[in-house]
Image: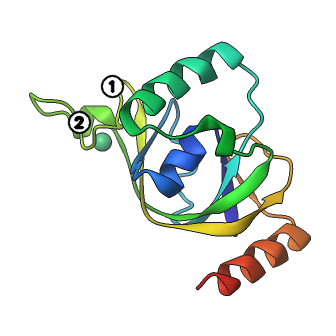
């Protein structure tokens, strides 16, 4: 199973708040459609994370205290990747979550793990280690 690392609260918003678009600066990962493990990475830019957190918290009233980092929180289906130039309308983009001048990863069917699986993240799209994959699979089966 492939995985991608997301900032919090974005990772939790994908799984719990209907965040259907992830904005990326590159198209990396376009060959990886399918189920994607959602990894919440440990922030390297507290200020950027705080700005994004404020936006999401204001919109969806999510409690930051319930958001783990450094772990796989769930899985989601990556169903499309396109550039914002291709989905712009007069009113905005394909989703309220979509940003201009970005690649939009369109996400669907989020499944939350009953318990996060701790692991280190990586840039781009990466492959779960066998032991992590086993834990993610077991927790998905336990919650279905
Ligand atoms: Zn779009």
In the image shown, does 100 or 50 lie closer to the viewer? Answer: 50
* Proximity of marks 1 and 2: CB atoms separated by less than 8 Å: yes
**Residue drawn 73% across and 57% down?**
72
Q: Tell me the quadrant of the picture where the C terminus can be found.
A: bottom right
* Res 28 visible: no
**Residue 120 as seen in the image, left or right of residue 7:** right
**Residue drawn 71% across and 18% down?**
45
**Residue 34 as seen in the image, left or right of residue 55:** right
What residue sits right under mark 1 in the picture?
A: 100
Residue sitting farthest toward the right: 131
Secondary structure beneath dot 1 equals: loop
What residue sits right under mark 2 in the picture?
A: 93
**Residue drawn 43% across and 50% down?**
17
Pointer 2 local density, CA inside 10 Å: few below 14, some 14–19, many at least 20:
some
**Residue drawn 22% across and 40% down?**
87
Ligand 1 closer than 8 Å to label 2 CB? yes
Pointer 1 local density, CA inside 10 Å: few below 14, some 14–19, many at least 20:
some
């Amino acid at each position: 199973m492939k995985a991608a690392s997301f900032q919090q609260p974005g990772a939790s918003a994908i799984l719990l708040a209907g965040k259907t678009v992830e904005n990326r600066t590159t198209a990396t990962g376009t060959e990886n459609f399918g189920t994607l493990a959602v990894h919440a990475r440990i922030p390297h830019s507290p200020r950027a994370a705080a700005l994004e957190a404020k936006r999401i918290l204001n919109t969806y009233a999510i409690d930051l205290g319930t958001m783990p980092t450094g772990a796989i929180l769930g899985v989601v289906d990556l169903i499309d990747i396109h550039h914002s130039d291709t989905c712009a309308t007069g009113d905005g983009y394909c989703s309220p979550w979509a940003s201009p001048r970005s690649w939009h990863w369109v996400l669907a069917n989020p499944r939350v793990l009953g318990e996060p699986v701790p692991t280190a993240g990586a840039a781009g799209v990466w492959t779960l280690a066998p032991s992590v994959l086993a834990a993610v699979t077991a927790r998905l089966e336990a919650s279905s």
